[in-house]
Image (spheres, rainbow, N blue to C red):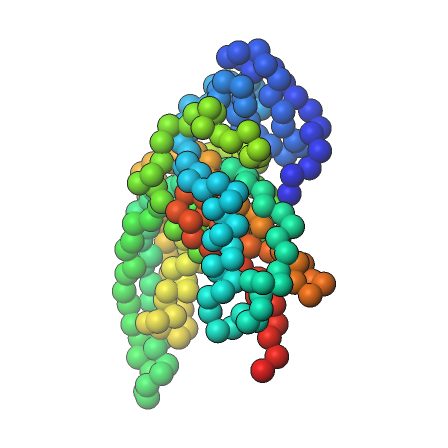
Amino acid sequence: MVAAIAENIRCTHCGAPVEFKPGELVATCKYCGFTTVIGTGQAFNFEHSMLLNRYSPEQIEEMIRNWMRSGFMKPGDLSKKAKIIEKNLIYLPFWVVTVEATSKYKGIFERIAPPITKEGEINKEYNWLVLARQAADFPTRAYDVPLAGKVPYDFRKIEGFAKLLNSEMERDQALELARQQIDEHHRFLLQQNIDRVIEKTTTVDSKQMVYLHAPIWFIKYEYKGSIYQMLIDGAAGMVLRGDIPNTKF
């Protein structure tokens, strides 16, 4: 996920080199925190916030061991036998899109006889999270981003051992992706009310967009010769994803 540095530009604010990789569109200077749009050099004109990491590597390891000891689906000796081989803290870039979304629909409810035609509307408000990386396997829908804890971006609050990734999406691209994902989500919700869709239109009214860096711990551990991965939210201490070794009963 973290490739070799390909190019760099000069920060228009402090003059320091700003490292970026092919495909990244919004870069943040690690020396002064100034954010610019690559290619134009223009200052980033959206709110740039961050979530603070609240856990040390030692605390994260304790959290991993506690997770390994809990749950009946895990091997009984997992906590004792597993070897943690990587604990990387990476600040991932997200676009948080605050929207009101409305889907009007007409469809057939076929679970009764005779089938009936139903019409209705789904209206919801979202703080929709879009990972600002083009190719990344991250459980965005499982990540309940703690927006109440966000603060203005401050490069001085980034740990020296942590990595910071830049955005590979501009605002309009992130907004369009959010629209598509919300439309798919509403189509899923429709399955509760109808079995066959005849008509559906979805409108998404964007209220606000925030560019946010969030601390995620990327963990790898070895157990009986196999490698497994975990993702932990560094702001709230939640395990977002954890691979569990197969257990034979």
Residue at x 58% of width, y 24% of height: 38
Residue at x 58% of width, y 82% of height: 249
Q: Say if 223 sits above or below 89 in the image.
A: below
Whether residue 37 is visible to the viewer of this picture, yes or no, is no
Q: Position of residue 189 (x, y in %)?
A: 37, 65
Q: Position of residue 245 (x, y in %)?
A: 61, 68
Say whether residue 247 is left or right of residue 106.
right
Q: Position of residue 116 (x, y in %)?
A: 30, 79
- Examine the image and state in which quarter residue 17 appears: top right
Residue at x 52% of width, y 50% of height: 61
Q: Toward the viewer: 97 or 121?
A: 97
Whether residue 64 is visible to the viewer of this picture, yes or no, is yes
Q: Toward the viewer: 123 or 107?
A: 123
Q: Residue furthest bottom?
A: 113
Say whether residue 140 is left or right of residue 147.
right
Quadrant for the N terminus in the image: top right
Say whether residue 146 is left or right of residue 142.
left
Q: Toward the viewer: 74 or 95?
A: 74
Q: Say if 2 sits above or below 126 in the image.
A: above
Residue at x 63% of width, y 47% of height: 86
Q: Position of residue 118 (x, y in %)?
A: 29, 72
